[in-house]
Image (cartoon, rainbow, N blue to C red):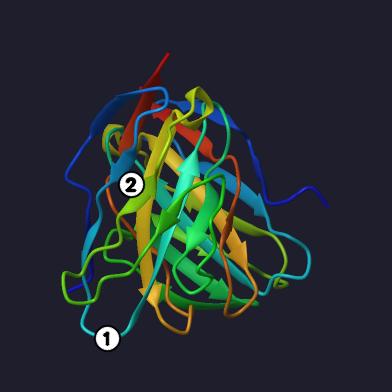
Amino acid sequence: AQRVTQPEKLLSVFKGAPVELKCNYSYSGSPELFWYVQYSRQRLQLLLRHISRESIKGFTADLNKGETSFHLKKPFAQEEDSAMYYCALSDYSGNTPLVFGKGTRLSVIA
Amino acid sequence: DTGVSQNPRHKITKRGQNVTFRCDPISEHNRLYWYRQTLGQGPEFLTYFQNEAQLEKSRLLSDRFSAERPKGSFSTLEIQRTEQGDSAMYLCASSLSPGVKFFGPGTRLTVL
């Protein structure tokens, strides 16, 4: 069964501190992993995907197939990073609907 | 084209009434998805279309729910005989096949 687990509902960090949002997955085939973000009063939007290997807004995420994880990291948190973050997966072709985790609310304290 | 749009943005209805939501995808996108999101949960897949064909339906989609995409452009999601448990945010997303899914702002349904 496909499943995405985000163990933390809420993560609070001070501005300038490192951030790590955890995501573990269960998938029988080859998955594609995503991080979506929802800022206050805005729609859900893609932050990054593992096949792009990009750094967006200072965030990076590495797919660890051995640990079935796709943790989101940023070395220095900013107040504008405060948002709801969702980890999601689909099959590697991108043809299947996304399966989402329950989300983690990141709160960056000034 | 400013992205995926959904109407209405909010709907309040009484239990037992029927409601219909509309989604207009990004114009060149051939895939359209419906998701439901309740408090404290991530979006949950309901159904999706490729052009006008409905390719997959989740078991979350009870018989009271029906979705259409008659000309392969906009889509409607109808809920008949609404129940309080139907209260949720209904999200629409579109994509090129395959490709990144772009989400609309959602329709928040409240069933009294």
Residue B5: x and y, percent? Answer: 69, 46
Which chain does the numbered disc 2 sit on? Answer: B
Which chain does the numbered disc 1 sit on? Answer: A
Which mark is on residue B76? none
Relative depth, front residue between B47 and A16: A16
Q: Residue at x 27, y 35 (%)?
A: B40
Q: Residue at x 57, y 65 (%)?
A: B68
Q: CA distance from mark 1 to mark 2?
A: 22 Å
Relative depth, front residue between B62 and B81: B62
Relative depth, front residue between B38 and B99: B99
Between marks 1 and 2 in the image, the one whose residue lies nearer the viewer: 1
- Res B38 visible: no
Q: Residue at x 46, y 60 (%)?
A: B66
Q: Secondary structure at mark 2?
A: loop
Q: Secondary structure at mark 1?
A: loop
Residue at the disc numbered 1: A29
- What is the tally of numbered marks visible in this picture? 2
Residue at the disc numbered 2: B42
Using a 10 Å C-alpha cutoff, classify the residue at mark 2 as few (fewer than 14 neighbours), some (14 to 19) or many (20 or more): many
Which kind of residue does numbered mark 1 sit on? Gly
Residue A19: x and y, percent? Answer: 33, 38
Which kind of residue does numbered mark 2 sit on? Gly
